[in-house]
Image (spheres, rainbow, N blue to C red):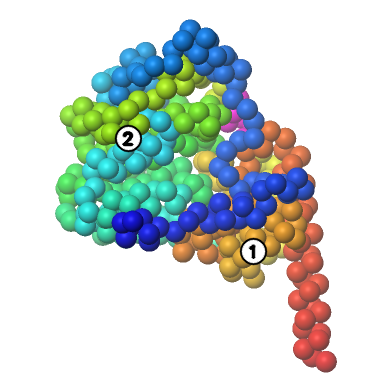
Amino acid sequence: MRQAVLNLEESRIREVANAGLGRSDVLAFWFGESDEGTPEVVRQAAVASIERGETFYSHNLGLPELRAAIAAYMSELHRPVPPERVVVTSGGVNALMLAVQALVDAGDEVVAVTPVWPNLTAQPQIMGARLHCVPLRPQPGGAWALDLDALLAAITPRTRLLILNAPNNPTGWTLRPEEQRAILAHCRRTGTWILADEVYERLYYAPSPKACAPSFLDLAEPDDRLVVVHSFSKSFLMTGWRLGWLVLPPAAVHHVGKLVEFNTSCTSVFTQRAGIAALQHADAITPRVVAHLRKCRDTLLPLLQALPGVEVATPLGGMYAFFRLHGHDDSLATAKRLVTEAGLGLAPGNAFGPEAQGWLRWCFASHDPARLVQGVARLKGWLQVQVVRQREYVGNIQK
């Protein structure tokens, strides 16, 4: 095996989940997906496609109808995006990997803003790149913020690629337009590509004219060195469908199409038909999803904030509460203990970067907010047991 592959760390999120899989008594909030099924109209579009016999290969870049639908959808939210800049992919992960394969050679320097979903830092390392992480900084109260000066200083003419995920998984941090403008201008000067993972842009709770988070597509020119990644997973409740897309500079599309051929060949036609249906009904599906997630967020966050020893801020975007549990500094060990001792499944913060050690991620995308209330009750009870044990330990020492 290649050394870069041997050096890859296994997912700590999966490590925690494996400790609780098969246990019906565990309330699981570890994975980044809703437990609500895909809307019926989307599922039926796939069924109809299969019944028509659409089970053959399609174009590397995606069905023309889907590329056109994605372009129209993106153009409503941002500056005009023609279909010729869109590449359909087999999920957001595949979109990210295609982008990294297209842009990064072994030995290239890549800068990433962390903490972040571990796939985003693993992919350049798989390609043999030299990774430099610029951490967000936790603020009093549990919010995270970007040190823009530190990020710009880290990006030099030697930097091949900058990887950004905003709204951010796991912290909920979101880039401001003025930060995006400064980053884009700086990367133009250094010749650095920007890979913007914007899959959570519609899961945005701050006031916004377009009901989405700020995007680099609001600022960039078509030929800028910018690749934007999107997915149907979050906004359309389609995680298992593995359907995503890239928005690329026009000159890059043909070459990425070659990579699609050598990775997956194409995305299944019936999955793409489901994507078309999702976009046709986006005005009905996505606002309902976002409204429900806001209700879940606003159910969970006050309960967490009321717990002693918990530090957490209300996220502006995404589907996660990211909180510090004071006195429990080993995230992985704490997450495993919560599974076995409290029946509560959370993701360990250090899965997303060493700067998030001592934090935990709670996905609040639950069809029933009562599950969130029940989960907080389990966490509260577990914390109370830890206090009692600590007092008993101190008492025994004093004796």
Q: Which residues are magenta?
A: 288-294
Write down the residue under mark 2.
263
Farthest-out residue, top: 52
Q: Earlier in the sequence, mark 2 or mark 1?
A: 2
Query: Splitting the image into 4 quarters, where does residue 58 fall?
Result: top left
Q: Is residue 290 magenta?
A: yes
> Quadrant where the N terminus lies?
bottom left
Work out whether residue 45 can be spotted.
Answer: no
The residue lying at 39 percent from left, 40 percent from top is 197
Amino acid at the residue labelled 1: Thr
Write down the residue under mark 1.
334
Q: Is residue 292 magenta?
A: yes
Work out whether residue 64 can be spotted.
Answer: yes
Instruction: Give the secondary structure at mark 2.
Output: helix
The residue lying at 41 percent from left, 39 percent from top is 93
Q: Position of residue 118 (x, y in %)?
A: 44, 52
The residue lying at 64 percent from left, 30 percent from top is 36
Instruction: Give the secondary structure at mark 1.
Output: helix
Q: Position of residue 160 (x, y in %)?
A: 22, 50
Q: Main secondary structure of the magenta part?
A: helix
